[in-house]
Image (spheres, rainbow, N blue to C red):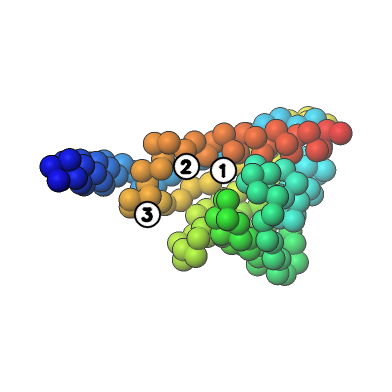
């Protein structure tokens, strides 16, 4: 009986410490990456502005090839909505909020697991030379308490790095 008592006290102590640590961690997050691709700005932007193409290069689609996808609207234009359901990477929605073809930028709102709070994301394609472009892919958002504790163990930058490396492979073939 003493063992059970000490075991429960230990488990409650670990939970309390975990929640206390999470209370002091930031609730905001920023992640992203950038890469140079040996293709023109127009070619790269025409590919990345189409959200349907993301499944070809984003790392999350590679983690779960059984993602259930749904698309609404005209891809590559504001208002286009992509929703997904996945047992491995979670559920979510991505909405194009702005497309600036002249400056090579697409802005998107991402909503994770039924949240009404938008996480702001963008992809920016910049011309480095006529046949070389830089692609930036970034996200800023909030992680609710106590899930902000995941920031200690999960580096989303690696997923953005992997996704952009896949994009480079696809476009440079």
> Under tag 1, what secondary structure?
strand
Residue linked to disc 1: 138
Mark 3 and mark 2: Cα distance apart in space: 14 Å
**In the rendered image, the vertical position of residue 53 relative to residue 38, given as above or below:** below
- 43 left or right of 137? right
**For the view shown, which residue lies furthest in the bottom direction?**
73
- 167 left or right of 93? right
| CB-based contact (under 8 Å), mark 1 and mark 2 | yes
**In the rendered image, the vertical position of residue 2 relative to residue 79, given as above or below:** above
Of residue 95 and residue 100, the one placed in the foreground of this image is 95
Q: Quadrant of the C terminus?
A: top right
Instruction: Measuring from the top left, give residue 90's x and y in whole percent.
Output: 55, 55
Q: Earlier in the sequence, mark 3 or mark 2?
A: 2
Instruction: Measuring from the top left, give residue 66's x and y in whole percent.
Output: 69, 54
> Under tag 2, what secondary structure?
strand
Residue linked to disc 3: 144
Which numbered dot is residue 12? none
CA neighbours of label 2 inside 10 A, class few (<14), some (14 to 19), many (20+)? some
Residue in the picture at 56% in, 59% down:
91
Residue in the picture at 52% in, 39% down:
156
Residue linked to disc 2: 30
The answer, for residue 9, to whether it is visible in the render is no
| CB-based contact (under 8 Å), mark 3 and mark 2 | no
> Under tag 3, what secondary structure?
loop
Instruction: Measuring from the top left, give residue 147's x and y in whole percent.
Output: 38, 50
């Amino acid at each position: 009986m003493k063992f059970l008592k000490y075991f429960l006290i230990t488990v409650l102590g670990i939970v309390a410490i975990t929640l206390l640590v999470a209370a002091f961690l930031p609730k905001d997050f920023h992640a992203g990456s950038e890469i140079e691709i040996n293709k023109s700005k127009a070619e790269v932007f025409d590919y990345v502005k189409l959200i349907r193409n993301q499944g070809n290069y984003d790392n999350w689609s590679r983690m779960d090839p059984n993602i259930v996808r749904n698309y609404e609207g005209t891809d590559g234009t504001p208002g286009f909505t992509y929703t997904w359901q996945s047992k491995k990477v979670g559920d979510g929605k991505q909405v194009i909020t702005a497309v600036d073809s002249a400056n090579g930028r697409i802005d998107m709102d991402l909503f994770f697991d039924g949240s009404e709070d938008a996480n702001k994301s963008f992809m920016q394609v910049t011309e480095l030379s006529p046949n070389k472009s830089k692609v930036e892919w970034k996200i800023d958002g909030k992680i609710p308490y106590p899930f902000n504790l995941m920031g200690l163990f999960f580096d989303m930058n690696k997923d953005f790095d992997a996704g952009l490396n896949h994009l480079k492979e696809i476009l440079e073939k």
